[in-house]
Each structure stands twice: as C-alpha cells, then as structure tokens.
Image (cartoon, rainbow, N blue to C red):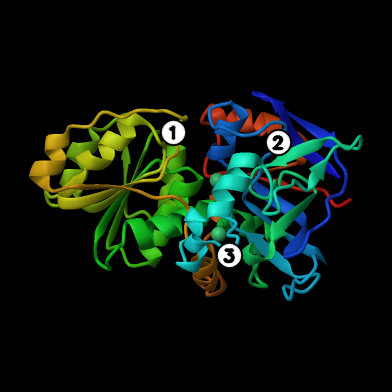
Amino acid sequence: MRAAVLRTPHRLEIEELRDPRPGPGEVLVRVAACGLCHSDLHVIKGQSPARLPVVPGHEMAGTVVALGEGVQGPVIGSRVVAPFILPCGRCAQCARGRDEFCEAFWSLNRGQGTLYDGTTRLYTPAGDPVWMAGMSALAELAVVPATSVFAIPDEMTLEEAAPLGCAAFTAYGAIRHAGALEPGERVAVIAVGGVGANLVQLARVLGAAQVIAIDVGAEKLDLARRMGATDTVDGSREDVRARVLELTDGEGVELAFEALGRPATIRQSLDVLALGGRAVVIGVSAAGGLTEIESNLLVRRQLRLIGSYGARTRADMPQLLELAAAGRLRMAEAISRQVTLDEAPQTFAALDRGEIVGRAVVVMEPR
Ligand SMILES: [Zn+2]
Ligand SMILES: [Zn+2]
C-alpha cells in the first residue's frame, strides 16, 4: 500500500509499505479519507514526541475489509469512522469509562508507536518496522482496534465523516465533559480551525444561547458564521475583551474554549469570561510550551481553567453519530480542501502557514 511516512522531522514522503494485517481484536479498514490535523503537524515538525519512522493520520473514515481473530463486529463492507483515541477496553481506565486515559493507548501507541500486543502493523517491503501514531491513517489501509470503529450514517459521505474522528470528537468531549455546557449559557470559541468550527456548531446544537467566534481574518469568521456562530470578533482589528463584553451586556461568557494552544489565546480565554466562568484549553502546544497567567484573575473572579483531551471513545462516539444521523451537523461545510495522498506534505505546509480554513481532507484514490 501507499502511505505517508515521516523518517526525519519536516520530511513527510509517500512510500510503498507492505499491506498490513489485523491481529486478534482488530479490524482492517480501507481508508477513504483522512483529515489533516494540527497535532500531526506538531509530529511532522518534531515538536511532539513520536517514534520514527512513523505514519501519521488519526482522523479517518473508510470501509472495513478484514476482521482479526475474535472480532464479532462490524461486518466486512461497513462504512466506519475511527476516533483518534483507541481504547484497549481492558485497563483500569477503560473499565472506568475514561477511554482518553487508556493505559495501553498512552504507553504503547503514544509511547512506543505500536498496537496493544506491543508490535506495529506497518513494515517496509524489506521488512523494517514503521511505527504507528494512532491508527496511522495517512495510508491506503489502516489497522484499528475493534473497540474504535463505528458505523456512519448512510446519508453521510466518507469524506464528511472523517473529521468526526478528531475535530468533532475533540469538540464534543470539551463541551460535554470539561466544559459541561448548560443550556442557555454564552460561549466563546477562540480559533476557528477544524476543532474550532466543530466547537461552534456543537455548542449551538448542545444548547448554547450565544456563540461568539474569535479569530483573525474574514474567511475563518465567515466559516464560523456558517457553522452557527451568533457573533464574530476579528482579533486583528478589534479589542477582543472589549468586544465580547459589549456582546454580553458587559458580563462576558460563562464558557470559553481555546483551540490553538498559544499563550496569547490561552490568556484571552480567561479575559472574555464572566465572573465564575470556565475556560477550556484544547489547543495542543509544542512540547514544553509555557503560558504565564495573572493568577489573581482566577482568584478574585473565581475563574476555572480546565484542560480537555479528546473524548470518551466508546460512550461519546455513538452520541456524536446520533447527532450526525439526525442531520444536525454540518460536516461538509468545514471541509475547505480535498487533496490526494501525494498532496498531503504540501497541504501540511499550508496548514502550518495558517492558510487552511476549517479542515483539509486527504481523499484516497481507489486502487
Ligand atoms: Zn487531530
Ligand atoms: Zn485501556
């Protein structure tokens, strides 16, 4: 199969690898589409630890083509999406339902670049191992633990469904768990990229009365409005805090989401809060990144600063897919570019330059 392989930072290249085979408890998916996400960009730039060589790609939809030993479902031929957190289903965290803390996911997949028997499914034609990041979906085939594949609604295309696996999944977890949005609350979303666009739409769908999208440039703010933002603030032209206060009767919002991972925007997420408000940080910074905050703000205004990572795969994904099946999500709207696998390296470069509005999605050519 063809796959995007990173052997040294900054150099993602398309290579031929052996077709992978699923082990016990795993399924083989023919990848139809894979979104290009900022956290892979951190890996490509060497800012996030990963064992090299690696195949990135963790926002994927495709068709099940083979089942490993002991797998009861899904059936071969079903169209599935796979969220980026792949719970083992056996550890203490998985038993508590906290799939995002799965011990095997962190120690073996993130730590070692393998699946849960401690080996990779990816090899060069010469038999040398290539390590995995998540299910390594920037490839024509991907092996995924059976805990982590979910059927997608008939009316959805595979291209539309792919961003459900990271952008929408991450937004859903942040809103439901870390943010614990209550109906009628006012929300600010800082940075309207792939995750931000989904934060905007899901905040509306899950009951926010007002969603203020904050970014720079007309294109991203237009996307935010199409995703359901009630108001937009252009940080390059407007004083963000003053404008948010103006839009909220001088109070600020109850809940702010930061989806960029930069010190200035993390501070901004506190600046726009009402008394007692919650700021949820979702944006992943480069490893070791530090943010200074004025701690008296937290104390006197009783603000809460909360981190959020992904969502709870087995509990949350069926609920997110229910919203999709009910036609309540505008997934196609947030996809601004469809590119080929060969165009993935240059499209990551465009993402790095801030040129991608919403999501760019790699669509695999049929082989
Ligand atoms: Zn992602
Ligand atoms: Zn686990």
Q: CA distance from mark 3 to mark 2?
A: 26 Å
Q: Which residue is mark 2?
A: 54
Q: How many marks?
A: 3
Under mark 3, the amino acid is Arg
Q: Position of residue 267 (x, y in %)?
A: 26, 35
Is 291 situated left or right of 301 in this image?
Answer: right
Is 291 situated left or right of 119 in this image?
Answer: left
Identify which residue, 362 or 145, lies in the foreground.
145
Q: Residue at x 49, y 71 (%)?
A: 319
Q: Nearer the viewer, mark 3 or mark 1?
A: 3
Identify which residue, 288 or 167, lies in the foreground.
288
Q: Which residue is mark 3?
A: 90
Under mark 1, the amino acid is Ser
Looking at the picture, does residue 220 appear above or below residue 60? above
Q: Residue at x 60, y 57 (%)?
A: 86
Mark number for residue 285?
Answer: 1
Under mark 2, the amino acid is Val
Identify which residue, 267 or 110, lies in the foreground.
110
Is 305 situated left or right of 35 in this image?
Answer: left
Report if the beta carbon of the residue with label 3 is closer than 8 angstroms to ligand 2. yes
Please tell me which of labels 3 and 2 falls first in the chain: 2
Q: Residue at x 39, y 55 (%)?
A: 174
Q: CA distance from mark 1 to mark 2?
A: 20 Å
Mark 1 near mark 2, Cβ–Cβ under 8 Å? no
Report if the beta carbon of the residue with label 2 is closer than 8 angstroms to ligand 1. no
Looking at the picture, does residue 318 appear above or below residue 176? below
Q: Where's the N terminus, which quadrant?
A: top right
Q: Nearer the viewer, mark 1 or mark 2?
A: 2
